[in-house]
């Protein structure tokens, strides 16, 4: 393609040159015919002459070439020049990359560029936008929405969603699912005697204990003010009892430092196993009932339901 013919239109040149989005024109073979400054900034890791270079060298994933060629075939097959949108990764360094969104369409080479070869008449425009910051922000918002603000572990909604996943898996590939419902004993008294901040410190410390002692596949969540839940996939009732007793014993013998004092507390535990028929709420209610049995027995103990 004759680049001078392209930039000859001053208005079009200014729009493309000063566009905050990367704009790249390629031929049917993926060779670059034009690239604007914003696109050069995106591909700053590339060391070489852009004119005539293969577009495939600028992107990180191996599947990009097949994806682009598929889009080119689809664009050639359609009568109207409707764009395709897809995502890819651009090399940032030899070991890092970032995500971009690409809108790709076929442009009217006959009218725009005049008399050029048949091959070069098949011109495709790629409008490229860095979406890594936007995606990171979206991921952060989604993560914050699924975590308890104080303790940083799952909230009730997230626990519900993850439990539903385990229910479905357990039905396809049968395995037991146990649940621990845990309450911090006399938490109201702790707040009244030492202050709300002391209570918050206990909640945070207990959550840290869960992170330290639970398996990666276990799902821990704060369900209420001082109530927690732990989903234990692949563990039977007797195995869950051992986990609950180990955790109860550890808490009983661990002091939490708060200012100049040591805070000691205990937990009561209710244990249930999913019967593969009950829904989430019914499962939780049985766990809470088991926890209530532990409290009625004098706290700092385990009960099953």
Image (tube, helix red, strand yellow):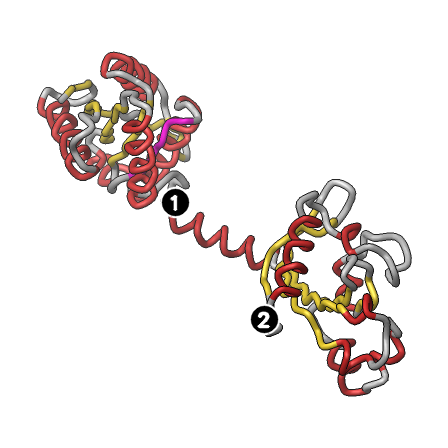
Res. 126 image quadrant: bottom right
Q: Secondary structure at mark 1?
A: loop
In contact (CB < 8 Å): disc 1 and disc 2: no
Q: Residue 16's x, y, as percent?
A: 75, 77
Q: Residue 166's x, y, as percent?
A: 32, 32
Mark 1 surroundings within 10 Å by alpha-carbon count, few (fewer than 14), some (14 through 19), many (20 or more): some
Q: Which residue in the structure is indicated by mark 1?
A: 147
Front in this rendered view, residue 171 or 210: 171
> Magenta region, mostly helix, strand or loop?
strand
Is residue 219 depicted above or below 146 in this figure? above
Instruction: Name the residue at 65% across, 68% down.
Output: 105
Is residue 59 depicted above or below 94 in this figure? below
Mark 2 surroundings within 10 Å by alpha-carbon count, few (fewer than 14), some (14 through 19), many (20 or more): few
Instruction: Name the residue at 77% across, 87% down.
Output: 11
Question: Residue most toward the left?
Answer: 296
Label number found at residue 82:
2
Q: Residue 223's x, y, as percent?
A: 26, 40
Res. 290 image quadrant: top left
For the magenta stretch, what is the residue range?
217-222
């Amino acid at each position: 393609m004759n680049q001078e013919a392209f930039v000859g239109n001053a208005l079009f040149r200014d729009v493309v040159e000063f566009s905050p989005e990367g704009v790249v024109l390629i031929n049917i073979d993926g060779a670059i015919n034009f690239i604007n400054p914003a696109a050069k900034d995106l591909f700053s890791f590339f060391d070489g002459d852009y004119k005539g270079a293969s577009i495939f060298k600028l992107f990180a994933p191996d599947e990009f070439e097949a994806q682009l060629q598929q889009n080119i075939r689809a664009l050639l097959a359609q009568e109207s020049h409707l764009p395709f949108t897809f995502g890819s990764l651009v090399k940032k360094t030899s070991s890092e990359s970032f995500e971009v969104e690409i809108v790709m369409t076929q442009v009217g080479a006959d009218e725009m560029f005049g008399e050029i070869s048949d091959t070069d008449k098949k011109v495709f425009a790629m409008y490229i936008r860095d979406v890594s910051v936007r995606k990171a922000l979206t991921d952060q918002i989604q993560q914050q929405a699924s975590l308890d603000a104080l303790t940083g572990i799952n909230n009730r909604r997230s626990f519900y969603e993850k439990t539903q996943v385990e229910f479905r898996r357990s039905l396809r590939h049968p395995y037991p699912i146990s649940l621990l419902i845990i309450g911090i004993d006399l938490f109201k008294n702790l707040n009244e005697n030492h202050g709300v901040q002391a209570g918050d410190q206990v909640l945070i410390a207990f959550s840290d204990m869960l992170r330290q002692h639970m398996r990666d596949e276990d799902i821990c969540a704060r369900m209420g003010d001082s109530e927690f839940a732990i989903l234990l996939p692949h563990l039977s009732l007797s195995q869950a009892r051992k986990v609950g007793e180990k955790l109860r014993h550890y808490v009983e013998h661990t002091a939490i430092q708060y200012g100049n004092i040591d805070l000691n507390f205990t937990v009561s535990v209710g244990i249930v196993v999913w019967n593969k028929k009950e829904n989430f709420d019914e499962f939780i209610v049985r766990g809470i009932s088991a926890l209530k049995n532990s409290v009625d027995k004098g706290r700092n103990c385990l009960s099953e339901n």
